[in-house]
Image (cartoon, grey):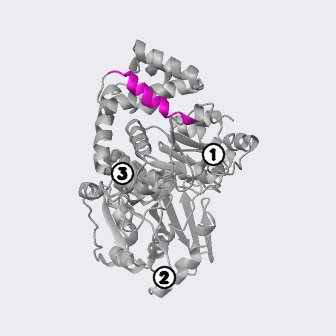
C-alpha cells in the first residue's frame, strides 16, 4: 500500500513542502530511504522502531520504501521522524488515516515516543497556510511559534500516541490559539537595560541618540572600563519599536537558526548580538556545508555589537563590507544560492591603543609602530561604512558616586521616533528609509548647505586634516542632527556637532 504524508524543509529563511511517500511491499524485507536524506534522517528507523514498540505498535517485517520528494533537494535533521512513523503505520494498515493529507506533520521522536522540539517552525507554518493545508501537527514546545500564523490550525502533541489516536480513533487534539497582536503589543517596550543607569558620558549618549535617529553605524573609542559595552547594550532601548512585519522577518531567521525559546512566540524587541572576537568568517556572515544564518543575519532589524573591534581577525571584518552596503548576505554553493537578510546597525568599540590608554598612557608603552599596526586592523573601506566615531572618556569618581539618575531611554526614544518619522516622510518615494542609507545623488538634494555651513566644513577639512571620505559622513550625520531638532535645513551648529564625530579621521590617530 502507498501513502503520502506531508512535511517541510527549510531553505534559507523559507520553507518548501516535502512529500513523504511510504510504500510497503510483501515481496521481501528491508527498509529503504531515498530522496537525499542526511545521516540524521537515515538513523530515524532506529528511533521510530523503539518509539512505536513503546506505544504498542511496530515496524512491519516487510519491504518498506520511503521516498522524500522532491528527490533532488537535500533534507536534513530529525524533524521527519513523526511524519515517517505515521506514514509507516497507515501504509501497513495498523491505523486509519483518511484525512492525513490535510496536515503538515513534523517532530523528532524520542525512544519512548515523546516528541522533541524542532527548528524553523514559523516559515514551515507560513508555507503550510499558503499551500492550503488545514493544520499543522508538531511538538508542543513549538506551538507558540507556529500559532503566530493565522488561518491555520496548530496542534501541539507530547507523544506520538496522541497523533495515532487522532487519526485512528478521531480523538481530538487540543488546538493552540494565540492573539498575535496582543502578544506583540504587551512586550514591545520590554527592555533589560536603560540609559538612566549610565553615569556621566553625556557626549557618548548624545552620539548614541544621533546614531539611533539616523540608523548610523557607530564606533566607540575609549580606555577599558569607560562604559563602552554598557552604552552599546542600551542602544535597542532607544531604537524605534519593531513593526509587526519586521518582527515576523526577525522571528523567521531566529526560528531557522533554532534560537527561539519555547516560551517565545514572536520577537518583540530588536535583537542585540555580541559575538566573541574569535568568531570565524562563516559564523559571522552565515554559510557552512548546510547553510545557516550567521550573526549579522541574527542581528537583522537590530544591533550587531563588535566589542574590541581590532581584536577580530581582519578577514572576519572585511567580509562584513558587502552586507553593510547591500543589507543582505548571499551564500552560494554549487547547486543552490541562499539569501539571508542582514539589515542591522553596527555598534563597535575599541581601545585607543594596544595598551588601552593612548594618548594618556603614563608609561607611554605604545610605540608609533605598534599604534600604526593596531589602527591598520581597521581598513579604510570598513571605516568608510561607519558614520560616527566618538571618544568615550574615563568616568570621574564624582560622576560614579552621584545618586541622580540620568535621562531614561523612553525619553530619548521619543526624540528618535520623531526624527525617524521626518525621514520616513522625506524618503517615502525612494527606496531608502533613514539618513544612513543616503547615497551621493541624494546628498545633493537633501543635504544642501548655506554659505556659513560650507565655509565651516571647508575649514574643518583643512585644519583638522579630515579625510575625503569624512565629507559625506559629516553631511549625513548633520542631516540627522537637524531632524532631531525638527529643523528643515542643515545649520552651522549641526555641522559643528557632526565634525566632532569623526575622531578616527583626524591626524591625531594617524601616528
Q: Is residue 142 positioned above or below 453 on the image? A: below
Query: Could you classify mark 2 by the number of other residues whose Cα lies within 10 Å: few (under 14), some (14-19), or many (20 or more)?
Result: many
Disc 1 from disc 2: Cα separation = 67 Å
Left or right: 326 as drawn, with respect to 245:
right
Q: Which residue is drawn at 39% across and 33% down?
A: 434
Q: Quadrant of residue 29?
A: bottom right
Q: Position of residue 420 (x, y in %)?
A: 33, 36
Element on which disc 3 rests = helix
Q: Residue at x 42, y 18 (%)?
A: 453
Classify the position of the C terminus by image quarter. Answer: top right
The range drawn in magenta is 489-503
Q: Name the residue under label 3.
A: 237
The tag earlier along the polypeptide, 1 or 2, is 2
Q: Where is residue 46 in the image (x, y as percent from the top left)?
A: 58, 78
Q: Is residue 342 positioned above or below 185 on the image? A: above
Q: Which one is closest to the eye, mark 2 or mark 3? A: 3
Query: Could you classify mark 3 by the number of other residues whose Cα lies within 10 Å: few (under 14), some (14-19), or many (20 or more)?
Result: many
Q: Name the residue under label 1.
A: 358
Query: Looking at this view, is 235 or 94 the one in front?
Result: 235
Q: Is residue 235 positioned above or below 103 on the image? A: above
Amino acid at each position: 500500500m502507498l501513502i503520502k504524508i506531508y512535511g517541510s524543509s527549510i531553505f534559507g529563511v523559507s520553507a518548501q513542502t516535502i512529500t513523504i511517500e511510504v510504500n510497503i511491499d510483501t515481496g521481501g524485507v528491508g527498509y529503504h530511504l531515498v530522496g537525499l536524506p542526511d545521516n540524521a534522517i537515515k538513523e530515524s528507523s532506529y528511533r521510530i522502531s523503539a518509539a512505536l514498540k513503546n506505544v504498542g505498535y511496530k515496524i512491519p517485517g516487510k519491504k518498506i520504501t520511503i521516498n522524500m520528494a522532491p528527490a533532488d533537494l537535500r533534507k536534513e535533521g530529525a524533524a521527519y521522524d513523526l511524519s515517517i512513523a505515521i506514514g509507516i503505520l497507515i501504509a501497513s494498515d495498523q491505523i486509519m488515516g483518511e484525512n492525513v493529507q490535510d496536515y503538515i506533520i513534523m517532530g523528532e521522536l524520542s525512544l519512548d515516543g515523546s516528541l522533541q522540539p524542532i527548528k524553523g517552525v514559523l516559515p514551515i507554518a507560513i508555507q503550510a497556510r499558503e499551500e492550503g493545508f488545514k493544520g499543522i501537527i508538531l511538538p508542543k514546545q513549538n506551538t507558540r511559534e507556529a500559532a503566530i500564523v493565522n488561518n491555520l490550525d496548530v496542534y501541539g502533541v507530547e507523544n506520538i500516541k496522541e497523533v495515532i489516536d487522532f487519526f485512528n480513533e478521531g480523538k481530538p487534539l487540543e488546538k493552540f490559539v494565540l492573539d498575535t497582536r496582543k502578544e506583540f503589543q504587551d512586550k514591545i517596550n520590554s527592555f533589560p537595560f536603560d540609559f538612566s543607569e549610565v553615569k556621566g558620558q553625556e557626549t557618548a549618549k548624545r552620539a548614541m541618540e544621533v546614531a539611533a535617529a539616523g540608523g548610523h553605524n557607530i564606533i566607540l573609542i575609549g580606555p577599558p572600563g569607560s562604559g563602552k559595552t554598557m552604552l552599546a547594550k542600551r542602544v535597542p532601548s532607544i531604537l524605534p519599536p519593531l513593526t509587526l512585519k519586521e518582527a515576523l522577518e526577525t522571528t523567521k531567521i531566529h526560528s531557522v537558526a533554532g534560537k527561539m525559546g519555547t516560551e517565545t512566540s514572536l520577537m518583540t524587541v530588536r535583537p542585540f548580538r555580541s559575538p566573541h572576537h574569535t568568531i570565524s568568517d562563516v559564523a559571522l556572515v552565515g554559510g557552512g556545508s548546510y547553510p545557516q544564518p550567521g550573526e549579522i543575519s541574527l542581528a537583522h532589524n537590530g544591533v550587531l555589537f563588535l566589542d574590541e573591534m581590532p581584536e577580530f581577525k581582519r578577514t572576519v571584518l572585511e567580509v562584513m563590507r558587502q552586507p553593510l552596503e547591500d543589507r543582505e548576505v548571499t551564500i552560494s554553493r554549487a547547486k543552490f544560492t541562499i539569501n539571508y537578510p542582514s539589515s542591522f546597525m553596527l555598534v563597535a568599540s575599541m581601545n585607543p591603543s594596544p595598551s588601552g590608554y593612548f594618548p594618556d598612557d603614563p608609561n607611554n608603552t605604545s610605540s608609533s609602530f605598534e599604534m600604526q599596526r593596531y589602527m591598520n586592523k581597521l581598513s579604510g573601506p570598513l571605516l568608510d561604512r561607519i558614520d560616527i566615531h566618538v571618544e568615550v572618556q574615563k568616568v570621574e569618581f564624582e560622576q560614579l558616586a552621584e545618586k541622580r539618575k540620568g535621562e531614561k531611554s523612553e525619553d530619548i526614544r521619543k526624540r528618535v521616533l520623531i526624527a525617524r518619522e521626518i525621514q520616513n516622510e522625506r524618503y517615502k518615494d525612494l527606496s531608502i528609509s533613514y539618513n544612513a542609507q543616503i547615497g551621493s545623488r541624494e546628498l545633493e538634494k537633501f543635504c544642501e548647505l548655506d554659505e556659513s555651513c560650507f565655509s565651516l566644513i571647508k575649514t574643518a577639512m583643512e585644519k583638522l586634516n579630515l579625510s575625503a571620505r569624512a565629507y559625506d559622513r559629516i553631511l549625513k550625520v548633520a542631516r540627522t542632527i537637524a531632524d532631531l531638532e525638527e529643523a528643515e535645513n542643515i545649520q552651522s551648529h549641526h555641522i559643528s556637532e557632526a565634525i566632532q564625530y569623526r575622531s578616527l579621521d583626524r591626524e591625531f590617530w594617524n601616528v
